[in-house]
Amino acid sequence: MSRRSRGDAGPDGLAVVDKEAGWTSHDVVAKARGLLGTRKVGHSGTLDPDATGVLLLGVGRVTRLLRYLGLTSKTYTGVIVLGTATSTLDASGEVTGTWDMADTTVEDVRGAAAALTGDILQVPPMVSAVQVGGKRLHELARQGIEVEREARPVTVHRFEVGAPLEPGCFPIEVECSSGTYIRTLAADVGTALGGGAHLRDLRRTAIGSFAVAGAVPLAGLAPERLLTPAEAMRDLPAVTVDDACAADVRHGKVLPAERLDGPGDGPWAVLDGAGTLLAVYEPHRAGTVKPGVVLAPSSGPDSEREGSGS
């Protein structure tokens, strides 16, 4: 536990939850607030209500780090069902078309998947949280409104197709960038094969290094199951600084890049000698780096702030 700026006490950390089907991501956050005794809970990477698997919850100060958790790749499993298209691109929607695709082979499906691997442009589905004109697409879809959506660049690192579980039903495993819709991939496979398809049994098995094997069911969530802020940022390159640099980091100072000497292009998790996360720093202008988020107190235990980057 940590005492924060308004004098309220509450846990800090990252929860790796294995979400059940039937829960929205917002439902999980609401339940977690009760289980953890704090309202300061947010999530990274929405999961559809019918989907299961890894959902990351930031708790306390870690809510301010959630934007960095979407920088890594995500892994999913599911089943493509050929021959039936739906309004939501998954099994929860209304049937919008049917085709006889009984002669489609696993080699055909793998060929279509290969064409959707790499850097591609993807049109987000109408039933999604993407905003167009200030309205979320799923809100418009509930009103029976369909709008034109701009294709967005995504990356599919891996798109594997297994032998059919039953006629027309092919298990898949996809590793992809944040923002990729697996439902859309399934529908696009059906279209590429001259018919239609939808997705069922979607499960997110990993976000970066946070995998189902290390997740807890929502009912088992408790403060002692939270990962520390440093563990929450374990997929970022880390820099351990000396005491003098740590003092400047705690004050959120813009630093010469060579002083931080972080590997790669950033952002970087900045740790003190004890392994405590002080801040996350990002590239800045003219050979400098700036704080994105400063977690460490700069003047006493009740201080925390966003980095100004000025």
Image (tube, grey):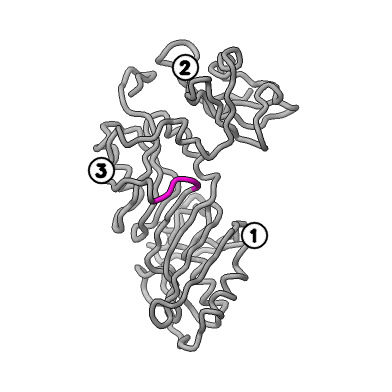
Q: Image quadrant for the N terminus? A: top left
Taking the view exactly as shown, the residue that stands out farthest to the right is 286
- Residue at image mark 1: 119
Place of residue 42 in the rendered image (x, y in percent of width and height, measured from the top left): 39, 39
Q: Is residue 262 left or right of residue 104?
A: right
Would you name the residue on which mark 2 appears? 297
The magenta stretch is 208-212
Q: Label 1 neighbourhood size at 10 Å, few (<14), some (14-19), many (20+)?
A: few
Residue drawn at x 29%, y 42% is: 30
- Measured in 3D between alpha carbons, the distance from the residue under mark 1 to the one under mark 3, in whole angstroms, is 38 Å
Is 296 within the magenta? Answer: no
Q: Does the CB distance between marks 2 and 1 fall below 8 Å?
A: no
Residue identifier under label 3: 220
Q: Position of residue 231 (x, y in %)?
A: 45, 34
Q: Residue at x 53, y 17 (%)?
A: 250
Amino acid carrying label 1: it is: Asp
> Tag 3: Cα neighbours inside 10 Å, few (<14), some, or many (≥20)?
few
Tell me where residue 178 appears, x and y as whole percent.
53, 51
Give the distance between the C-alpha atoms of the residues marked 2 and 1, in whole angstroms: 41 Å
Which of the two residues, 64 or 96, is positioned nearer the viewer here? 64
Give the residue type at disc 2.
Pro
Q: In the displayed structure, would residue 241 be above or below residue 204?
A: above
